[in-house]
Image: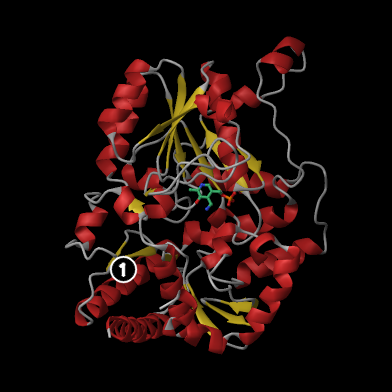
Amino acid sequence: MSHSESSLIQNYVRKTPKSRALYERAKSVFPSGVTHDARYLDPYPISVTHAQGPLKWDVDGNEYVDYFGGHGALLLGHNHPAVVEAVQQQLTKGTHYGASHELELHWAELITQMVPCAEKVRFTASGTEATMLAFRIARGFTGKNKIMRFKTHFHGWHDQVAYGAKAPVDGLPAGIPQEMTENIVLCPANDAEEAARLLQTDHDIAAIIVEPTGSSFGHVPTPPEFVSQLSALTKQHNVLLIFDEVISGFRAARGGAQEVYGISPDMATMAKAMAGGFSTGAVMGSKAIMDMMTIRSDDAEWNATQRIPHFGTFNANPIAASAGIAQLEIIRSTDAIEKANATAALIRDGMNEAIAEGELSWVTYGRFSDFHVFLNPDDLDITAADIDGARIEASVLKSVPGNLQSEFRAGWLAEGVDVISWPGGVVSSVHTLAEVDRTLTAFRALIQQFKQATTLQAV
Ligand code: PMP
């Protein structure tokens, strides 16, 4: 049976003719018809017209419970009234001043109050820019050239990080010079022994960057002990520790995963939940490190050769800043994070129950406001505790065939649920028990369809 003949894909295609038509148009102006690789879906993605709270709607009028969550930005759901109000007010006062403003200051002060490692902050326009800047600061501060990072961990799409995040097939993508890789040291995920060996043998490592909750917010979980080991190793070898908290920041806890683990890294990168759906990013860290960016008006030599330069037209623009202040004030003063975490736990438990009833070998896991589904193509005998305990290799978790992932996603879309292609999802503070029920009912229907499709295939 070819992929396009799959009954799950056929259901999806039947329900989404207008999305399909828009995709045909999109293909002529966008490569692959999309504007972000992760929004690609085989045979085509849905085209959305509007969203509210935990829901969104497509051009065909289908309603979805949304777990794509603006790629993780929407911890408070779509169009939170406080964020909308702040942005609407700001729109009438100006979108870009090309100057300093009090909003950026207020926003940064909230960040320094909430995030343990953040004494000083520099805003960027995206998470990718934040990791790129953090690497530059780390090199400037230490005088060393290399960055160690972990296979499968995702840090954006600039040359230094755009490879090594996939498994099992992974190479150097076209467009990235081989020489660039000389300054990147790739270590297997969660392998503290190998990290220690690399640090002992290579004295040109400036920093280690890690997604502290695991790659893609825990798709390949990182055990907390590993993060502690990295903290000890970096101190021992005089290497900086960077937490990439672009997803976990203001989501795993008010102060990010660093608050959960009680480990303050030298620097952290954040984005997504920091501005409730507007373009943003930031690097934060100790004064001594961040002051590598300081302009010294009386020291041209320092400015030209030692200080870290940084620009960016949209850094801390007033619209993102107004949204960010509204979002962070709510995250700081309410139980939004705890609510999202609790709802995600209900979803994970309910999905695992449904999987057990359906006698499938899939596993749903996660730790915070997330759920990840391992579609277990080889029917391995493993549990959520095995995966959350990081006892399952990254190569296994990331080896689910693409067509199975597409069927799962398209099949669940046809039942009214949108998830990220891992597959998995991020949960907001405004997903209620009603959405949980809908999600689990849709998941049970999806399981039945998978079983029917497999039976048909076997016949
Ligand atoms: N780091 C991590 C951990 C991420 O999840 C992402 C985005 N998915 C990035 C960096 C890149 O952020 P952006 O998409 O804002 O460039």
Vertical side of 152 occupied by 143: above or below: above
For image coordinates 63% across by 39% down, the residue present is: 175
Image quadrant in which the C terminus is located: bottom left
Q: Residues within 10 Å of mark 1 (few under 14, many from 20)?
A: many
176 lies left or right of 389: right
For image coordinates 51% across by 67% down, the residue present is: 68
Question: Percent from the top left, x then y, of residue 348?
Answer: 30, 70
365 lies left or right of 267: left
Which residue lies under the disc numbered 1?
Answer: 345
50 lies left or right of 55: right
Vertical side of 186 occupied by 298: above or below: above
Question: Percent from the top left, x then y, of residue 349?
Answer: 26, 72
Judging depth in this view, the residue of 174 and 291 nearest the camera is 174
Image quadrant in which the N terminus is located: bottom left
Q: Is residue 66 visible in the rendered structure shown here?
A: yes
Vertical side of 19 occupied by 314: above or below: above
Splitting the image into 4 quarters, where does residue 276 fall?
Answer: bottom right
